[in-house]
Image (spheres, helix red, strand yellow):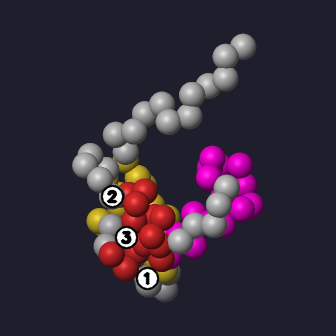
Amino acid sequence: MEQEIIIRPLREEDYAPLAKLYDYYTRNTVYTYYTGAVDADYMHRLFDGKGHGCSVAVDGSQTVGYVHISPMMGLHKPCSM
């Protein structure tokens, strides 16, 4: 029987598995602008603050994804041509 993926609000215990997911993508893809090692403290700082919202996707006991809504826009300005 397949596990159902559940979307739920972020919990304190989610920061470490989310850091592992985010760290994989920072080291192996071009999906993020971050280049340093990612840990649970970094994820906590990333998702904490007024106006931020985060939900996680879990498959059984495994964290498989997240969505982060942030009031920060224009963090990375495009290069002028």
Indicate whether 12 appears above or below 54: below
Which structural element holds mark 1?
Answer: loop
| Sequence-wise first label, 1 or 2 | 2
Which structural element holds mark 3?
Answer: strand
Instruction: Report the amino acid beneath label 1.
Output: Gly
Please provide percent x and percent y for residue 67.
Answer: 42, 55
The residue tagged 2 is 48
The residue tagged 3 is 6
Instruction: Report the amino acid beneath label 2.
Output: Asp
Indicate whether 62 appears above or below 67: below
Magenta region, main secondary structure = helix
Please provide percent x and percent y for residue 76.
Answer: 56, 34
On the rendered structure, is 29 left or right of 19?
right
Residue located at (50% from left, 76% from top):
17
Q: What are the residue bounds of the magenta stretch? A: 17-34
| Sequence-wise first label, 2 or 3 | 3
Q: Is residue 19 magenta?
A: yes
Circle 1: is it few (<14), some (14-19), or many (20+) Cα within 10 Å?
Answer: few
Front residue (pair 25, 62): 25
Kindly check if marks 2 and 3 are in contact, taking CB atoms under 8 A apart as contact: no
Q: Nearer the viewer, mark 2 or mark 3?
A: 2
Instruction: Report the amino acid beneath label 3.
Output: Ile
The residue tagged 1 is 60
How far apart marks 1 and 2 lie (CA) works out to 25 Å
Circle 2: is it few (<14), some (14-19), or many (20+) Cα within 10 Å?
Answer: few
Residue located at (40% from left, 60% from top):
45
